[in-house]
Image: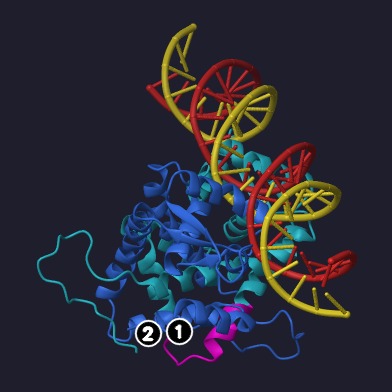
Chain colours: A cyan, B blue, C red, D yellow
Amino acid sequence: MEVALQGRSKLRGKTHDAEPMYDLIELFFFAYRDFVGDADRLLEAYGFGRAHHRVLHFVNRQPGLTIAELLDILKITKQSLNRVLKELLDQNFVEAHAGVADRRQRHLYATAEGRKLALDLAHLQSRRFARVLEAAPDGARQDAIRFLLAMIDPGDQDRVAGLVWPPSPPPVS
Amino acid sequence: MEVALQGRSKLRGKTHDAEPMYDLIELFFFAYRDFVGDADRLLEAYGFGRAHHRVLHFVNRQPGLTIAELLDILKITKQSLNRVLKELLDQNFVEAHAGVADRRQRHLYATAEGRKLALDLAHLQSRRFARVLEAAPDGARQDAIRFLLAMIDPGDQDRVAGLVWPPSPPPVS
DNA sequence: TGAAATATGTCAACATCGCTGACTTAACTT
DNA sequence: AAGTTAAGTCAGCGATGTTGACATATTTCA
């Protein structure tokens, strides 16, 4: 009942081979839906949506991020970003400061209130991971990390890795 | 550099403990984005979106599904479903037949064309999994399945498992 | 049989969050 | 001084979700 029919084909074309992995496809769909569902419920209380969450998350994680850098991470247009960013600025979850070297740039920072919300959201999602990992064998965390990183487009893995594990801790120590 | 600070707290409250698992949170986000991105590009060629994909996928997986069952799987409103379902019906990717026992019900089936598209989409996403699993150790597939299933709301895991691994193959055999 | 419940479809209005295109302003670079 | 760059803004649109109200056919039940 567990054995898959992986490499059983012989003379078929290269593109459509092997049975679709319906289980992984569907589990990934449902797992992600519940994963974001946690945050959705908390965000609702603030009148925010997922777009606000993503912006707040990355600004909080990388204080001083510029608009251009944020756009590159989120892969959306500046018009889309501006709508939600403006709300986060107006409601004081994020603040912007003109750059020193280049005063055209706006460096974004989460305010105390913003950091609190970002942390609450991160804790919510971390608790789901914690529940999963508690009931899992020892290497599970590293296995999950490797699996998820590998799921990313190969050409993007380095970029994402550099973002997830920032290359340098602040030089002040 | 790899060691986390998991259970280091002492007198803190029960809710907000432990460091957020930013790596897992972010990797899950980026992995899912690329996972659905595969399908998005193919769907575009047909003028379809993700909503069409989900409907076609589950109808193809469970021929004879009724509207109510589909709504229960997708957790959307019938108005949302109807919009995309109508397009799939009109363009002959899905067809509906009145129920025999209960003629109010509409049983949904993917047409030949619908099955082809559904399979193409599933193959696309399976190839991503295949790439990941080829480069991974032996237990990786089962590990991923266990991880993703555990990520689902515990109260929903049985329902999803019953959906992903249908309880009975057709009794005709 | 007649009333109530059920399965589905539909109309209207709206929210969120993505997009394109065009244009502005300010600041930096050459 | 001219050109480039970073950011903001206006207008319009598309996909996909939501509520609420109502219509129709069919089945179930008292």
Image coordinates of residue A113 in percent, x first then y, are 77, 59
Residue that extends furthest to the left in the rendered view of this protein? A11
Q: Are marks 1 and 2 in contact (CB under 8 Å)?
A: yes
- B153 lies left or right of B88: right
Q: Looking at numbered disc 1 in the image, what kind of residue is underneath it?
A: Arg
Most foreground residue, B34 or A74: B34
Q: CA distance from mark 1 to mark 2?
A: 6 Å
Subunit bearing disc 1: B
Most foreground residue, B153 or B168: B168
- A133 lies left or right of B119: right
Q: Is residue A131 magenta?
A: yes
Q: Residue at x 63, y 66 (%)?
A: B68
The quarter of the displayed image where residue B57 is located? bottom left
Local secondary structure at mark 1:
helix
Q: Which residue is mark 1?
A: B146
**Quadrant (top left, top right, bottom left, bottom right) of the N terminus of chain A:** bottom left
Q: Looking at numbered disc 2 in the image, what kind of residue is underneath it?
A: Gln
- A170 lies left or right of B119: right
Most foreground residue, B160 or B79: B79
Subunit bearing disc 2: B
Q: Residue at x 45, y 67 (%)?
A: B63
Most foreground residue, A171 or A74: A74
- C16 lies left or right of A139: right
Residue B156 shows in the view: yes
Badge 1 and badge 2 both on one subunit: yes
Above or below, A31 relative to A139: above
Q: Which residue is mark 2?
A: B142
The quarter of the displayed image where residue D18 is located? bottom right
Q: Which residues are magenta?
A: A127-140
Image coordinates of residue A155 in percent, x first then y, are 32, 55
- Name the dominant secondary structure of the magenta segment: helix
